[in-house]
Amino acid sequence: MQKIESIDALEAHYGKPKERTLRKEITYINEHYRAFIEKSPFMILATYGEKGLDCSPRGDPAGFVRVVNQDCIQIPDRLGNNRLDSLHNIINNPKVGLIFLVPNVGETIRVSGTAEILVDQALCESFAMQGKAASAVISIQVEKAFYQCQKAIVRSGLWQSENHIERSELPTVGEMAKVFADMHNVEFSVEEFDKEYPKQIKKTMY
């Protein structure tokens, strides 16, 4: 089976990028990208460190990512499972990548830069939700930003209601968790877990 193993082979296979796709990349957050980021309630944070690659979903009401200025954005880190995969990675390798999505919008905004983890009390409290301060704030010095065309979203039909499925078509959270409980020979009740799961989510949201 043929495979590509060099940059020259890769570029020969795909051809040169269109000039307009290169022009849209800038080194800061302009007014249009800022408007998009401030309307986004959901983003993906990609990091890489000693434990390998990680992609972490982040979400809150639109505006939860703060555009401090054209060179800096800040993301609140909320109460979670304390795996801290992304934060471990940032300490070991501060380079990060982000993708911002807005419901019912095809385009996405991609940002990359250098991150640091801030725990200043006043800053964390400025990101409070339901009276609870952020656990930390991920502050990112922007190095690259550009918009991605809507082809992927259109092809996926992500926002089309006819493509939405019933949750019952997939394994429950309890069923997925039981696989790992069985691997570690831990007693586990799928029914009890699924019953308590919505309450636990609500209780630990912030």
Image: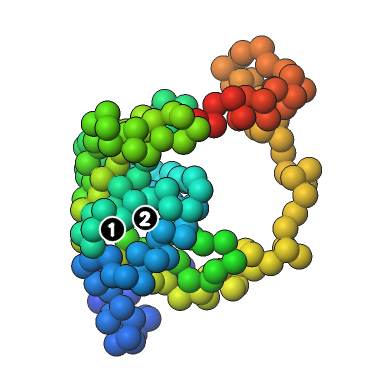
48 relative to 111, above or below: above
Q: Mark 1 points at which residue?
A: 112
**Whole-number angstrom distance, CA of label 1 to CA of label 2:** 6 Å
What x and y, as percent, mark residue 47? 32, 46
Q: Which residue is drawn at 74% across and 45% down?
A: 167
Type of amino acid under label 1: Ser
Say which residue appears at 46% left-offset and 60% top-offset. Answer: 39
Q: Which of 24 and 169 is in front in this view?
A: 24
Camera-side residue of 25 and 64? 64
Q: With respect to residue 105, does 59 lie above or below?
A: above
Q: Residue furthest bottom?
A: 19
Which residue type does callout 2 highlight? Leu
**Residue 26 position by quadrant:** bottom left
Q: Residue at x 59, y 73 (%)?
A: 154
Relative to 34, is 69 on the left or the right? left
In the rendered structure, the answer to whether residue 53 lies left or right of residue 199 reads left
| Residue 40 horizontal/vertical position (percent) | 47, 57
* Residue 4 visible here: no
Give the camera-side residue of 93 and 146: 146
The residue depicted at 59 percent of the width and 25 percent of the height is: 203
Q: Which of 75 and 154 is in front in this view?
A: 75
Q: What element carries label 2?
A: strand
Residue on which disc 2 sits? 98
Marks 1,2: beta carbons within 8 A: yes
Instruction: Confirm whether residue 36 shows in the render.
Output: yes
- Disc number for residue 199: none
If you read the primary sequence from the N terminus, does the residue marked by circle 1 or circle 2 appear first? Answer: 2
Residue 56 image offset from top left, x and y in percent: 43, 44
Classed neighbour count for the residue bearing mark 2: other residues with Cα under 10 Å, few (<14), some (14–19), many (≥20): some
Query: Picture coordinates of residue 59 (x, y %)?
Result: 49, 46
Q: How many marks?
A: 2
